Image: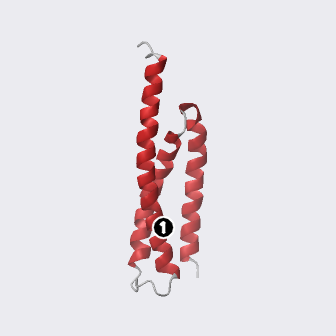
């Protein structure tokens, strides 16, 4: 079996993972909010200019994978000992938000 790296080396790797995850999570969060906003604007704004509903279609299609990547990246921002707990919170919250978005948009 391989020996464990020194404690300071592991903390440097963890810090690098957290920083990279934070950068990508912020980019995904921006894209996710844009796509969800596009869906909601297309659905509920009478003056949206989206008369054919492409905002709903493409926003819905794009928001699912972007949100999934976001829900998998956000837990990596936390310290390593909290990753499992953060995954157990972020994935169900993402699932509930996605279901609520589609129920809210499709209703009526």
Residue drawn where x is 58% and y is 31% of the image: 81
Q: How many marks?
A: 1
**Horizontal side, residue 83 vs residue 28: left or right:** right
Q: Report the quarter where the C terminus lies.
A: bottom right
* Image quadrant occupied by the N terminus: top left
**Callout 1: SS:** helix
Q: Which residue is drawn at 45% across and 72% down?
A: 38
x, y percent for residue 68: 47, 53
Q: Mark 1: few, some, or many residues within 10 Å (few <14, many ≥20)?
A: many
Q: Is residue 47 above or below residue 105?
A: below
Q: Which colour scheme is used?
A: secondary structure
The one of 40 and 57 positioned closer to us in this rendering:
40
Q: Residue at x 56, y 57 (%)?
A: 95
Q: Residue placed at 60% from the left, 44% from the top?
A: 88
**Rendered location of residue 100, percent (x, y):** 59, 66
Q: Where is residue 47 in the image (x, y as percent from the top left)?
A: 46, 87
Q: Report whether 54 appears left or right of 71.
A: left
Q: Which residue is identified by label 1?
A: 36
Q: In this view, does 83 lie above or below 73?
A: above
Q: Position of residue 98 (x, y in %)?
A: 54, 62
Looking at the picture, tell me which residue is in the foreground, 45 or 58.
45
């Amino acid at each position: 079996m391989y020996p464990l790296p020194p404690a300071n080396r592991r903390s440097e790797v963890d810090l690098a993972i957290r920083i990279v995850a934070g950068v990508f999570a912020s980019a995904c969060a921006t894209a996710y909010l844009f796509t969800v906003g596009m869906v909601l604007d297309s659905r509920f704004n009478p003056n949206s200019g989206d008369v054919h509903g492409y905002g709903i279609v493409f926003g819905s299609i794009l928001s699912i994978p972007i949100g999934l990547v976001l829900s998998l990246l956000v837990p990596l921002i936390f310290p390593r000992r909290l990753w499992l707990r953060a995954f157990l919170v972020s994935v169900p919250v993402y699932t509930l938000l996605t279901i609520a978005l589609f129920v809210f948009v499709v209703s009526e």
